[in-house]
Image (tube, helix red, strand yellow):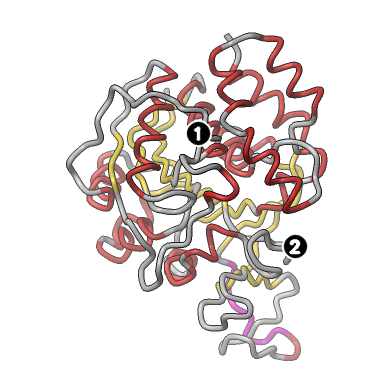
């Protein structure tokens, strides 16, 4: 029996590859793709998602959501992904159109009609915050909420303390992490180091000579250069596909543990920081440690610390092959 998925995304280069993985996975049925402003504006993200869906030959409804964070202005990441979010390759307009229903309503309805659905979030958490605030009854109906966001190691990619998706809309992230959802946090650090697509991986994908393989490399061309500029890492970093791999096959996770995770949404210095209470020292009042852990906060997320890198890459190769 196919597993039902709903994917919330700000589709740019790595999001597109993650969508391909989900849409081509044998036992997964993507019920809806919901769009949020993030890497690029809402309209461009929607166009990118529709184009990517078309490449797979699938027909999945795509819904437009929030065009800006809950309370802040939208800060894009076009410098990293290109002006169009897909490496400025000049891809043609998609043939499919977005649905007229708002994304938040689509999320609520899709969850209610598919209890036990897996939710995967690849962008800022604005839509999810709005959905669980409007209809909190959907929370227990979501079996897993796999979030690409945060930096459990406290090395951020947009500030020293924060990862982009959480930083863009920390108020939304605070709501989601406080909602009771079965959160699995896949931090940005998991796409670094050997998890990057190295030149031998890129050559292997090119050698397969498939449309999806060439798209995977081409749409990430700007991101590859930006990755080196940002992190001095050689290769293509793919945080969203890593997250999708965790959602598709939990066996790709080598090490994870449950913790209380707080989202900093008041301090500008550490805006968007995912504060992971690894030792259980956070008291009833946030930022107050209680000696002896007498009043430690209950864990609200499973934090992924390590993945099986060869396994994740093989999953990617499988999804974009012939």
Q: Say which of 226 and 37 sits in front.
A: 226
Label the magenta part by its dominant secondary structure: loop
Viewer-proximal residue, 26 or 84?
A: 84
Residue depth check, mark 2 versus mark 1: number of the one nearer the observer: 1
Front position in the image: 302 or 233: 233
What is the quadrant of the N terminus in the image?
A: top left
Tell me what residue is drawn at x 67 percent, y 9 percent.
208
> Magenta stretch: residue 296 in it?
yes
Residue 31: image quadrant is top left
List x then y, in percent, for residue 265: 51, 77
Report the residue marked by disc 2: 153
- Label 1 packing within 10 angstroms: few (<14), some (14-19), many (20+): many
Badge 2: residue crowd in 10 Å (few <14, some 14–19, many ≥20): some
Determine whether, in the image, residue 303 is placed left or right of residue 200.
left
Q: Where's residue 241, x and y in %?
A: 60, 37
Q: Residue at x 49, y 41 (%)?
A: 85
Which is nearer the eye, 298 or 190?
A: 190
Is residue 316 shown above or below 184? above
**In the picture shown, does residue 192 fall above or below 4?**
below
Q: Residue furthest left?
A: 100
Reading the image, the residue beneath label 1 is: 16
**Image position, residue 73 (x, y; %):** 40, 68
Q: Residue 54 location, x and y as percent?
A: 38, 21
Q: Secondary structure at mark 1?
A: helix
Please provide the residue range marked out in magenta.
293-299
Measured Cα–Cα span from mark 2 to mark 1: 26 Å
Residue 116 magenta: no
């Amino acid at each position: 029996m196919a597993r039902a998925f709903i994917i919330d995304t700000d589709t740019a280069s790595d999001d597109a590859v993650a969508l391909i993985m989900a849409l081509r996975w044998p036992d997964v049925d993507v019920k809806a793709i919901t769009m949020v402003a993030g890497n690029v504006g809402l309209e461009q993200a929607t166009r990118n998602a529709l184009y990517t869906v078309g490449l797979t030959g699938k027909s999945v409804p795509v819904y437009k959501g929030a065009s800006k964070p809950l309370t802040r202005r939208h800060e894009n990441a076009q410098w990293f992904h290109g002006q169009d979010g897909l490496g400025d390759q000049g891809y043609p307009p998609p043939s499919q159109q977005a649905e007229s229903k708002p994304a938040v309503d689509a999320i609520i309805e899709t969850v209610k009609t598919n209890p036990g659905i897996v939710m995967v979030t690849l962008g800022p958490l604005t839509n999810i915050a709005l959905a669980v605030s409007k209809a909190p009854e959907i929370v227990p109906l979501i079996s897993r909420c796999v979030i690409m966001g945060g930096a459990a190691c406290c090395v951020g990619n947009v500030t020293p303390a924060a990862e982009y998706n959480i930083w863009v809309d920390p108020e939304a992230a605070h709501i989601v992490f406080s909602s009771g959802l079965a959160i699995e946090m896949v931090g940005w650090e998991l796409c670094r180091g050997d998890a990057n697509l190295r030149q031998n991986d890129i050559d292997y994908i090119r050698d397969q000579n498939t449309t999806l393989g060439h798209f995977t490399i081409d749409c990430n061309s700007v991101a590859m250069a930006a990755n080196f500029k940002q992190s001095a890492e050689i290769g293509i970093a793919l945080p969203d596909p890593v997250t999708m791999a965790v959602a598709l096959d939990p066996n790709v996770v080598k090490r994870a543990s449950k913790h209380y995770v707080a989202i900093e949404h008041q301090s500008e210095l550490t805006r968007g920081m995912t504060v992971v209470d690894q030792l259980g020292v956070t008291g009833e009042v946030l930022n107050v440690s209680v000696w002896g852990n007498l009043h430690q906060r209950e864990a609200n997320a499973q934090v992924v610390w390590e993945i099986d890198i060869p396994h994740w890459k093989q999953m990617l190769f499988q999804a974009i092959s012939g």
